[in-house]
Structure formats: structure tokens, C-alpha cells
Amino acid sequence: MSLEEQLPDTVEEGQSADELAELLGDLVIDREDHVNAPGFVIRPDTVQDALRRLRDDAGFDHLSCVTAQEYEDRYESIYHLKKYDDPTQEASVVVPADKEHPVSQSAEPVFRTADWHEREAYDLIGIDYDEHPDLRRILLPDTWQGHPLSMDYDQDRPQIVSLREHANPLQEDQRSDSDSDTMFLNIGPHHPATHGVLHVKATLDGEQVADVESDIGYLHRCEEQMCQTKTYRHQIMPYPDRWDYISAGLLNEWAYARAAEDLNDIEVPEYAQIIRTMGAELCRMAAHFLALGTFALDVYGDFTAIFMYAVRDREEVQNILEDLTGQRLMFNYFRLGGVVWDLPEPREEFFEMTRDYLDRLPEHLEEYHDLVTGNEILQMRTVDTGILPPEVAKSYGATGPVARGSGIDYDLRRDDPYGYYDELDWDVIVKDGCDNYSRLLVRMLEVEQSAKIVEQCIDLLEDWPEDERNIQSNVPRTLRPDDDKEIYRAVEGAKGELGIYMRADGTEKPARFKIRSPCFSNLQTLPEMSNGEYVPDMIAALGSLDIVLGEVDR
């Protein structure tokens, strides 16, 4: 099916697990019960048929997460599906593969986002995906020996490569046709416009971009493996702050907290939910301010004005967050069941400082609209460049402002409610321009909505009875979920859907911990936005994605 081709209009809503099993028919060889999604086990050679039926006939148009893992007797790939129209409708397709020869059919012809997800599974676990268009390592160097998350991986094995591996990769592709204008251009990995250590391999035809390949993995830190060696209760929570480290720490912490709390049936007091919601929206504001400043820097090259204005507002938000959490970046403020401590004392000073900033914010936002969105030069650079049609965005699993800038009305805060969002008055910002300008506008307008949410939380917290300020529920010291209990849970991070998949094995540590990074999926859309454009337009498109490489590489 073409990416521009619309999905069927006659999609049933709210199918039961039995109805989905009937739809899949003889493709299903077994059933599993995951915490929030029915699981259907299929043969490894029927992946595409199963996913097409679920997409075209049941409306599961969002391949949210792909997880791979190894058991004693098999390998397994899990495709977690949702609906953009209703993300509470979920299903998992479980694909076991032979232990000796782990081969499974690729899902890439059905969902383009499976390209990178399956490459990562091949890289770290060792599953071979048949019919994948470009199955090679994505995080580790091509010369790497072994698969780090496999059971037989020897971490002491020396990584020695032959001299041939360091040869010029373009030596056999020297231009011989004097009439050709094709040129290979390296962008990054150490360049401000790549927003971290990202290496963009661009092929130019004259002055236009003919092809783009994102080379990631320079910042890979094995965060998933580290979490698999830590306990649910105390040791994992400090790690999420380090994924998207651009002021979004509380949003990251909430992704883990939501998954772990649902996995262990932990309730969170209402008072703590309000504090969480307030802190998360302050983080969203800080992250969006930096996204605005760096995007203007990419487009204008102006460091002294707009970038520093944005950093000014980010610093003011971080002052509030520092008072709340004690830290400016690595907050470590959430705990399973609530938060680590109450609002700072005296509470009146904290409320006053927050309100003072919220009162000044409209004037600051007006400045940004004068300097940025109302600027004719920026409009020329961003309107109708970096086009990402909605069906293409869906196939790549794009979420957050990237999806909402393409007219996709999808926000987990509203569509899969958690925290205190469903009790507050706010709006989801959606723009249908599908271009760099729309993605910028979505972030700027979302700052206004976040401020609206924070103000309502302040009103609630200010009037909350003192004897009902419960910041944390009673959580057992040691958490041991049942063996083979599985869950995928996500929150609306600053960049989009940030999800966590966990499988328990009956111990106090997860047997599998998978991070679904919104930046990882969003970055895949760069070629779609850049091909046929000019190099400066590609830089603007990359900036409009608002990626952070710590979360892409993990």
C-alpha cells in the first residue's frame, strides 16, 4: 500500500480479543495475556499478513513499539500496536523464532517504522528479519562482534577489526562521469545543527538532497541493559532523567513510573498526581523553549537574540523545578506510588514564584511570535518545506508535535488519560500544514497550554487540605511481579510517545526492559522531509524534529 493511500474508512471500534483472534484466523497459533493488551502468537513467516489484517481491517495503524528478547528455548519479537484514533485499543503480535536460527519475517513493508526497530533488534539481540530492506547494525559499528543483549554474549571478547574495515567507503564510487553533479556530503556528527552526535550522510544532486541516511549510535549507553540489572523499587528511577536530558526528566520518570505501577498494581494518591502533572508540564515548557531556540539558531544562525531569549525562559522554568525537586536536570523526583517529597516550604513563596513567571509568560510569548513566527524570513525558510503528510507520519510511528504538526490529533494525555490531565481544562494543539513551520507553531502554542495546566494545578495545590497531602502510597519494599507478566505503557513526552515495555521473571529486576523513544521513531522521517529539498531545508527539517541523541541512542 502506498504511504499516501488512505486507510479504510470502515474500521470497527473497540474489537474484543476474541474478535481480533477471529480476524487473524489460522495465523494465530497461541494466545497470551499482557497487562493492557491481548497477545497473539503467530508463526515467523506470517508477520506481514497478520499486521496487514490488524491495520487494514481493525484500524491498528500505529506500530508503537517493537521489542525483541531471548529465552532459554527461543527468540521472540513483539509488535505492539495501537490506534491513532484511540490509543487505549492495543494489541501485541508475538513472533517466536528458532533458537538455533532466529529468522522472522520483517514488518517493514507494512509499517515503515519497523525498519529501524528491527535493525536495533538485530543489532542488540541477534534476530534476522527476512525481507528487511537494509538489515545491518544501527547502534553499534558494523564490525562489532556479537549481540550485547543475547544470552551468550561475551563482554570480555576483544573487538578487533582488520585494516580493511577502515578503508575509504567511497573508494569504489569515485565519480567518473564528468556530467554528473552527484556529491556525497557528511554532516556531523560533531556539529551544532545535528543537535548532538548525529552523522547525516547526504547525497546531493546539484544543490538538492537526493538521499539522506542518519547514522546514529555514537552516544549509545546500554540504558536498557543497565535497567535490566536494577531493582524496580529503588534503582531504576534515576536512569530515565538521562534519556532525554533536555529538561524533560520528569516526563521520562513518569514513563517508567506508569509502567512499573501498572505492572505492580500500585495506586498513586490524587495529591501526588497533581504534583506530577504540574512538574511534567513545567518540564514540557522548558523542553519546548530550548526546541524553539535551537530551531531559530538552525534557520537564522542567530545565537545572541532568539536563542538567548529562549534560554532565559528555560532558566526561569528550571528555577521553579529546582525548588521543587532539588535538581536542575537530573531530577530523580518521582517514586513508584508518588513523589519523593512535598512542595518546598514555605509553600506560599513557591506558589508566588510560579505565578509571577506565569503572569510574565504571555508577554514573552508575544515577543517570540514577533521575532520568530511572524518573521517573514523564517516563514520563507519553513513554510512548505520539510513536508510530512499524515499517512507517511503514521507509517513511521511519528508522535508528539511532529505528528500534530501533520494534522494528526493524537495526544496520550487526553487519549489515554493518566495523572490529573482528564480533570483539567486544556486543549490539544493540532496544525495541518505538515511543514517545518507547523511543527514550530505546535510547540509554541503547547507552551501556552502547559502554562494553563500548571496554573490550574497551583490553584488545586494551594487549597488542598493539609491533612490530605499524601505524596506517596504504601509500596512494598521489594517488588516481584509474576513470572512472564508483560506490559507496555507510555506517556506524552515533550517529543512524543515515550513508552516502556517490561517483562517480569518473578525476581525484583525486569527480565526485559525496552525504551520506546519518540525521537528514535521521529528521526526516521528525515529522508521523507528532506529528499528533493535543499541542504538548508534539510537542516531546518532536522531542527523541526527536536531530537535529543541521548534518547535516540539510549
Image: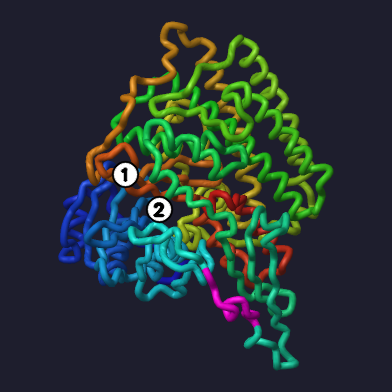
In the shown orientation, is residue 184 left or right of residue 257?
Answer: right
Q: Amino acid at mark 2?
A: Ser
Helix, strand, or loop for circle 2? Answer: strand
Range of residues picked out in magenta:
160-170
Q: Is residue 251 magenta?
A: no
Q: Which x, y percent locates residue 304?
A: 84, 44
In the shown orientation, is residue 424 left or right of residue 72?
Answer: right
Q: Quadrant of residue 231?
A: top left
On residue 227, which mark appears?
none
Count of residue discs: 2
In the shown orientation, is residue 255 left or right of residue 26?
Answer: right
Please, which residue is most extreme toward the right here? Answer: 304
Q: Which x, y percent locates residue 174?
A: 68, 87
- Neighbourhood count class around disc 2 (C-alpha, 10 Å): few under 14, some 14–19, many 20 upward: many
Is the residue 529 above or below the residue 283 in the image? below
Residue at 23% from the left image edge and 43% from the top image edge: 483
Q: Which x, y percent locates residue 243?
A: 53, 45
Q: Quadrant of the N terminus?
A: bottom left
Q: Quadrant of residue 8?
A: bottom left
Q: Which x, y percent locates residue 393?
A: 50, 59
Query: Looking at the image, can residue 523 be seen?
Result: yes
Task: Return the disc, 1 or 2, that comes first in the chain's sequence.
Answer: 2
Residue at 44% from the left image edge and 64% from the top image edge: 123
Is the residue 445 above or below the residue 522 in the image? above
Mark 1 lies on residue: 487
Residue at 70% from the left image edge and 93% from the top image edge: 176
Is the residue 279 above or below the residue 2 in the image? above
Q: Main secondary structure of the magenta part?
A: loop
- Neighbourhood count class around disc 1 (C-alpha, 10 Å): few under 14, some 14–19, many 20 upward: some
Q: Amino acid at mark 1?
A: Ile
On residue 64, which mark appears?
2
Helix, strand, or loop for circle 1? Answer: strand
